Amino acid sequence: MAVSLAETKNNAETDVDLSVIDEFRKESGILDTLVFDDAVNPSGGGGTLTYGYRRQSTQAGADFRKLGTEYTPGNVETTKHTVDLAVLGGSFEVDRVTSKIGPAASGAVTLNMTQKIKAAKAKFQDALINGDSKDDADENGFDGLDKALSGSSTEVNLNTLTDWTDLDTDTRAAFKALDLLDEFLSYLDGAPTVIVGNKKALSRVRAIARRSGQYTKDPIEDLLGTNGRPIVRESYGGVLFVDAGEKAGSADTIIPTYKQGNVAITVTAEDGNISFKINGEHTITVAYNANAQALQDAIDAVLPGSTVTKNSSTFTVVWPLGRIVTYSNATGVTIGDATSTNAPKTGLTSLYAYRVGLDGFHGVSTAGGQLVQTFLPDFTTPGAVKKGEVEMGPVAVALKATKAAAVLRGLKVQ
């Protein structure tokens, strides 16, 4: 059964839980619109928190047939996927002395709860976009859209740079941008629910929407902000657009805007292998004498869109958006510094779009479980320091059809 965050209020155990759920909804248009399939049974002490599904990768076809003959069979292709549900949140501590001061205790708890809600929201949205359960930093999380869409038919504009920094100088620029945005959204298999980007990208989307007369701001009827006014959401032609925000505990945006040096590639040689390190995070390791195809496959697994060629003992790797790296294995594992030219362009980012639905992109939760829980400090028990917690989950996301989501690459927004 599909359950939204708003609907989980019906199962909230306390007024505090009700308030916290509303805060999650206010903080995140992504969470407010996402539905969760509460289908996972946490039996066996929580050892089976795995959601299995099949992702549709091709569309069903149809054709004419001659009388007296059969249709040529053509089955929809699907691939099996699993995702492990994860728990996220945070705790805080308050000294019991504050409980004797009255308002101070309430203020300290409220401040910490509010900040933990924001952090949990940010962590969920970060995982929804960038999650990679095979990465050491995310091994307790779940896979996100960036990984699911990498190399797919709905990864659009991969090796092309599109300049959205100036929509006024060129009289056709705004129309071209509008055409590209509409083309991007047409890759989905139905009406998109949400467009997700960073602030820079969404300022461009907002400008495009205004110039086309399709920009609206609509209030969410049952959500009020601190000033007593309804929370509003922005949309383009009925498609909500949402800022992914910053990573939890950081000023770094969840969806980055790449600058000079962000696509940094270093090459090292050791123990018969050659390693490429991209952005100081992802490492590709191949044998020093690997052929071009093996190197191509290894690179594509981390950063699709490159091309690898080999001339004699010299490899040339052309990375997305222009960076070129060459190295030679003529002397075994002893190689010189990799040379690079055509440094990557600056100010590039991506836009994501998805269609919410149990047959498209949706969240996953446990059967009958609470999406959000709170644990307030108990000042009536022994102990000088009291702990409170905000927790979301176990949750994950699932992409049931490749064409239910898309990503637009190579947007120059600054």
Image: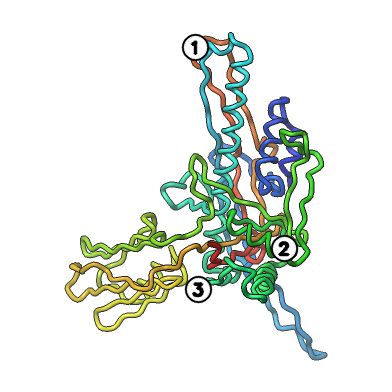
User: Is residue 37 visible in this depiction of the protein?
Assistant: yes
Q: Amino acid at mark 1?
A: Gly
Q: In the picture, residue 319 is in which quadrant?
A: bottom left
Q: Residues within 10 Å of mark 3 (few under 14, many from 20)?
A: some
Q: CA distance from mark 2 to mark 1?
A: 56 Å
Residue 321: x and y, percent? 45, 71
Q: Is residue 91 above or below residue 334?
A: above
Is disc 1 placed on a helix, strand or loop?
loop
Q: In the image, what residue occupies the spot 58% across and 61% down?
A: 80
x and y, in percent, of residue 372 in the image: 65, 35
Helix, strand or loop for disc 2: helix
Q: Mark 2 vs mark 1: which is more N-terminal?
A: 2
Please state the horizontal and vertical placement of residue 116, each as a whole percent of the image.
57, 33
* Depth order, front residue of 151/257: 257
Q: Quadrant of residue 39?
A: top right
Q: Earlier in the sequence, mark 2 or mark 3?
A: 3
Residue 325, labelled with which disc? Answer: none
Q: Nearer the viewer, residue 27 or 146?
A: 27
